[in-house]
Image (cartoon, rainbow, N blue to C red):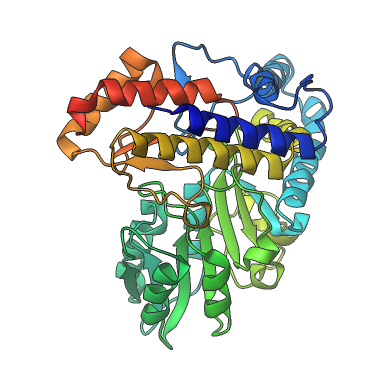
Amino acid sequence: MITDGTRRQFLGGIATASALAALPSGLGAADGGEGYWQTVRELFSFQEDRVPMNAANLCPTPESVANTVTDLTRSIDTDCSFQNRERFVQDRETARALVAGQINAEGDEVALVRNTSEANNIINNGIDLGPGDEVVIWDQNHPTNHVAWEVRALRRGFTVRSVTVPPHPSGPDDLIGPFRQAITQKTRVLALTHASNVSGILLPVRELSAIARRSGIHVHVDGAQTWGALDLDLKELGCDSYAASAHKWFCGPKEVGLLYVRRERIGDIWPSIVAPGWGSTAETELQGARKFESMGQRDDAALSALGDTAKFHHSIGPARVEARVRDLASLLKRSIADIGARLVTPVGDQLSAGVCIMEVASERRQLLFDAMYHDAGIAGSTSGGFRLCPHIYNTGEHVERAVRGIEKHRSLWA
């Protein structure tokens, strides 16, 4: 269970971090401690008997963002004329600029696609590869950044090399070494996952990008578990492309995603879909990374609401969001260890982010998953063990409740 010492350390850290940062306008929090985050929690409409703690898969949106999607969808249904829909062009560009600013990218380097899977496949299909080329991947990549490369290799004749890292790394060098050994003179692409959804391991992408790019290797990063969770600087991260979904840690609308492509690489990557907007000839391209989002009719209401989501994150501050995610994840992991459960995910911040997974035998995962939902009112996942991913809408009490539930059902994991 969570000890008094652990609780005091956690709450004290929150109070200190909050006292050092200016409170955001409009959220109404006055005390800078757990009361602040309770105010944030109240901006989400989920009920306390069914608490979401699975940000790695799907997050609730703030009620204000959900209302924007509803209101704009109703507006379209009421008047679907071109005249009424003209507003969405500017809304989309506003959202693009806000998102780009938060990840230290230029607007022309950002395509607003539908999700991480689509963004991964745009890179997979867009880079010219053939016999004699190699793609190095992590064996913990999501299927759209793993199986997708293997399927394409069957068509184009290149080789895919899968890298395994130690299950319990002691430091970044344990993660860098296997990739360094796998890279050869034939390697054209290094396809990574920033943070694994099945182990919670956070790869040292900055260091791996530096190694790969010195050899002219394209570095693609699946950031599904870091956009909206970490304070990102993609220029500092050093990757050539980065994919993510708004419906996960960014707490945004469904079927809206992000594909960042470094300006110097945009011209080398072919789009997967060519729809109206390209012009009258094949040589006519949309400006910058927009060429990757030419898909025909889109959900204009969701794209517009992405801008509202970006403003929501800005009102809190990406650095404060990351600090909160790490504080909750740290509390959860330490408390799980305190009751004798074994962690899949590394404890330290250097090797993990917000994804937290404990070891559970595969035949018992579903039982614990169901017991936690129906008995403890905590919605988790069976990915990689029993996975819980607390986010800014969660409170310290939610984490305590989760640990109590895990301890109560000890027979399912001990």
Percent x, y of residue 66: 64, 21
Percent x, y of residue 304: 72, 32
Q: Is residue 208 visible?
A: yes
The residue drawn where x is 36% and y is 52% is: 143
For the N terminus, the quadrant is top left
Which residue lies most toward the left here?
Answer: 363
Percent x, y of residue 161: 33, 73
Q: Quadrant of residue 327?
A: top right
> Toward the viewer: 348 or 222?
348
Q: Quadrant of residue 242?
A: bottom right
- Would residue 283 be found to the left or right of residue 124 on screen? right
The residue drawn where x is 46% and y is 28% is: 53
> Toward the viewer: 144 or 377?
377
Which residue lies most toward the bottom here?
Answer: 185
- Where 78 falls versus 138 (above or below)? above
Percent x, y of residue 7: 52, 29
Q: Is residue 135 visible?
A: no
Number of residue marks: 0
- Would residue 87 be found to the left or right of residue 7 on screen? right
The residue drawn where x is 18% and y is 39% is: 361
Which residue lies most toward the front here?
Answer: 5
For the C terminus, the quadrant is top left
- Where 317 falls versus 283 (above or below)? above
The residue drawn where x is 25% and y is 26% is: 368
- Where 250 falls versus 139 (above or below)? above
